[in-house]
Amino acid sequence: MDLLAGLRVVDMADEKGELCGRLLADLGAEVIRVEPPSGALARGLPPFAPDGRTSLYFAVRNAGKRGVVIDIESPAGRDRLHGLLDQADVLVESSQPGTWARLGLTAGELQARHPELVVTSITDFGQDGPYAEYQGTDMVGVAMGGMMHRAGIIEKPPLVIPGSLAYDLGGVSGALASLLAVWKRLHTGSGQHLDVSVMDSVANISDWSLPNYSLNPGLGHRAGAGIYTLYRCADGFMRMIVLVPKHWRALKHWVGNPEELADPAYDQFINRLINMDKIVPVLEGFFRDKKKVEVSLEAQRRGIPSTPLLRPGEVLENEHTLARGTFCKLPVGGGYEALMPSGFITIDGERVGPSHGPPEPGELGEAGFGEGDARAAFAALLGRPADPPADGRPLRGIRVIDWGVGAVGVEVGRILADYGAEVIKLESSDAPDFIRVIMSNYMNPSFCSSSRGKQSFGVDLTSDKGLALVRELLRDADVFIENNGTGTADKLGLGADALRELNPRIISFSSQSVGSYGPWKNWIGYGPNTHPVSGLQHLWNYPEDEEKPAGSTAVHPDHFVGRIGVMAVLAGLIARERSGIGCHLDCAQFESAIALLGDLFAKESLEPGSVHPQGNASPRGAPWGCYECQGDDEWCVINVRSDAEWQRLRKAIGDPDWAADPAFDGAEGRIAQCEQLDAALQEWTRDRDPRAAMEILQAVGVPCGIVAHPAHHMGDPQMAHRGYPKLVDQQELAAILLEGPGFLGSDLPEVLTEQAPMLGEHTREIASRLLGLSAEAIQELVDEGVLEDPPTEFKVL
């Protein structure tokens, strides 16, 4: 289903944010990729096909687009660009702030000439502020966004996540923001300028670090897998995450209830965490003679979240990804066909992804956008009389029923609430959102972040009366969100087919750990369970430690999938404006992790066995790494992309004797001696704090960034300039800082940042206002345990 059929997009993003146009194309938009006569920068980015020239980075992020060549440096080229923009709805671009001013192509000038156009600018740090002119790279974005400081092991430098997470996340933020602006344009008739910050987008998925630190200052250090333990098996490793008592009891029973695990205190997660040095050897002794997939299958059969650690080739060829069609073969250029991820989501059971490979340079010639019924229908939508929301919040009037848990579904609901949707969270003290109770109480900073601005409806979904009440809420709802175990919603009559019968206009979003179909569909898990089974865990490592997994304690891709979910829901709402019919959207979490490594899997499919952990190094240049700075576990990242940047770095650090080695004059020599180079450069960084190092090198145009932790974010001048930290007085806690958005809009008001609800806080109000129940009837249902008021004490489950 092409939800965005008829939407026209001009895509000028290069390297950063290229996934934005790809995602819009996946959803049915017509996307024209504009390149300069010299070709896109991204065509020269690794990884490459076996010829060493064909960029798989470009291929994966530009599949499904068409291509034109336009020289915007020439008046004729700018006229050609304006001609395309006259027909377009969205422009996506990633130029350095201010660089288009001399061409008369600033956002203001573009909007003056094309007032209905949505202009989406994706930059490293935003359009203005103290970092606006800084140079960025994907590693700088990961580091400064806060996704690097907890990755790796304490004995070694922080470890960047493999792939291009920061720039791809900038693309997802751009796609989400673009659709939000298109939705608003449908009601106002006007476009706007969207200012996407890669740094802020990454900070948004850094595991609630800002709210937690703002309430309880304290920094965790790198601990590899940390609490998400990897257990050695006969043929590798598997991850088993045991957070709740029922999983612990099932595990003990499986391994024979050994005396070493009999302490009743171990029933509580915090006590197990303190005693992992005693628990892990016992369990590894049991798993040592068993294979990783077999262990995971048996663990899952017993209801314990477990996944095997797979290498890239095993990800491409296992029974589950093959059955799901996780990969498809497409042309990637240079005469090659490679396997690449088939897409992030399914719509009504149909996989949504690229239908063809990336464009050849200028393949459309002088042609532009096509015509047809889809465009005519979309143009009719755009031509409706304006009906703007009273307070400017684009999602006013949208009602969302949120049955999410953890960090996936709940983040979809949270972001929709940020922009004005009414979001009602379904929960009960017998079946709470596990993030709400992870600290053995009903409120904590992580829950506050993900459920801010929502209303809580305490209801027992295991009772017929409770389910009947929820179905009544769903009759008039616009969106339903859930990320429970596969089949849970269907068993309760809340699956996609049942919802469609109940409310044909509803848009539902589901997300399960390894998907809702395929041989492993019933597997349960948390975000970190996707790391091993997606290949991410294997690749998120130091190259010298390939047989000793490192990784991170991040719950990624949970937060990332939440943003994919919002983007998909917005596309569904836009499509419903034409059809009057809703749809069911589904995103398997492990496939999102795979899709973010798509170019690496394409390379593995072309050259089996070629993809290994590369740590912090890059074939793009050297020095390229993470360097120790002055202070307690303080670091910075430095990336030199060219010989010119190398010469500027030499001058900035005082041109020491070691840097004068002629072998370092060219990239090939620097890469060949990168270890020697890194050690020498680190002698310079150790004498200054990371901010000083960043300011010195950025002053001469060398990409350098702080490996940020939440203490940095608390006082970061760029974040403060953009109004990123949001102060909220949270009940049951105190004043707390919550995350702002990854983007700002010229016609978007400040996001709503209201406190999170107590469990059941709005039960009576919702039952009266939306269900029409009398006070007496509500009290009777509360007395029966069907409905629930806020608990007076914590219930241990």
Image (spheres, helix red, strand yellow):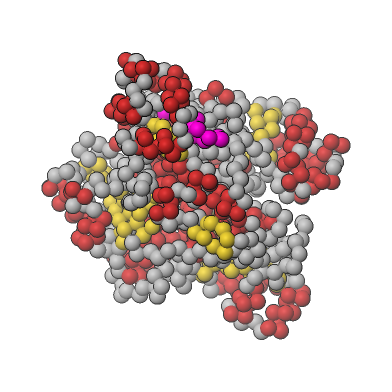
* Above or below, 8 relative to 56: below
Of residues 133 and 588, the one nearer the viewer is: 133
Residue appearing at x 48%, y 29% in the figure = 686
- Disc tally is 0
Residue appearing at x 34%, y 64% in the figure = 747
687 falls in the magenta region = no
Q: Is residue 584 left or right of residue 786?
A: left
The percent position of residue 593, horizontal first and vertical second, equals: 52, 42
The percent position of residue 355, horizontal first and vertical second, equals: 38, 45
Of residues 500 and 697, the one nearer the viewer is: 697
632 falls in the magenta region = yes
On the rendered image, what quadrant is the C terminus found in?
A: bottom right
* Above or below, 135 relative to 246: above
Can I make out residue 691 in this image?
A: yes
Q: Is residue 378 left or right of residue 451?
A: left
The percent position of residue 334, horizontal first and vertical second, equals: 32, 30
On the rendered image, what quadrant is the N terminus found in?
A: bottom left
Residue appearing at x 66%, y 69% in the figure = 760
Of all residues shown, which one is farthest toward the right?
259
Can I make out residue 324 in this image?
A: no
Give the extent of the magenta segment: 624-635
Residue appearing at x 40%, y 49% in the figure = 718
* Above or below, 611 relative to 575: above
* Above or below, 279 relative to 761: above
Q: Quadrant of residue 685?
A: top left
